[in-house]
Image (spheres, rainbow, N blue to C red):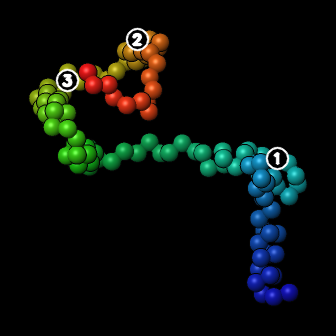
């Protein structure tokens, strides 16, 4: 047995977990555990970059946007800076109302735009 073969066989003994074709991992005992797609599905940490970094990222994205949208977003930025107490988060009732309004609307995302 070569050195490489010995090191590979040694790894198997230290790490008995095997992932099978169906996506379930098992230990050497044979107990099935979580599917391999769930093994690394932890929630990401709730960290966000500093406000200045987020604003700079948004500014870079805006530079590639339509000038009309750019003007509107600039207006929103001025309003938010001038009176931050007016900013309010969307509540669940507003999101639900919007979902109700478009509930029966069918769209084809691949269809070409109409001329009107």
Comes first in the chain, label 3 or label 2: 3
What percent of the width, then of the height, locates residue 94? 37, 15
Q: CA distance from mark 1 to mark 2?
A: 45 Å
Q: Residues within 10 Å of mark 2 (few under 14, many from 20)?
A: few
Q: Residues within 10 Å of mark 1 (few under 14, many from 20)?
A: few
Q: CA distance from mark 3 to mark 1?
A: 53 Å
What percent of the width, then of the height, locates residue 82? 11, 29
Q: Quadrant of the C terminus?
A: top left
Q: CA distance from mark 3 to mark 2?
A: 29 Å
What percent of the width, then of the height, locates residue 61? 26, 45
Please give the label number shown on residue 32. 1
Q: Is residue 80 visible?
A: no
Q: Is residue 82 left or right of residue 29?
A: left
Comes first in the chain, label 3 or label 1: 1
Q: Which residue is mark 2?
A: 101
Q: Is disc 1 placed on a helix, strand or loop?
A: strand
């Amino acid at each position: 047995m070569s050195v490489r073969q010995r090191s590979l066989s040694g790894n198997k003994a230290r790490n008995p977990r095997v992932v099978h074709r169906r996506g379930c991992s098992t230990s050497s005992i044979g107990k099935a555990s979580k599917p391999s797609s769930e093994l690394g599905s932890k929630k990401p940490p709730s960290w966000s970059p500093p406000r200045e970094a987020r604003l700079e990222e948004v500014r870079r994205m805006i530079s590639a946007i339509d000038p009309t949208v750019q003007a509107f977003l600039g207006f929103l930025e001025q309003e938010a800076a001038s009176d931050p107490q007016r900013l309010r988060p969307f509540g669940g009732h507003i999101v639900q109302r919007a979902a109700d309004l478009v509930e029966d609307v069918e769209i084809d995302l691949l269809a070409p735009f109409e001329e009107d």
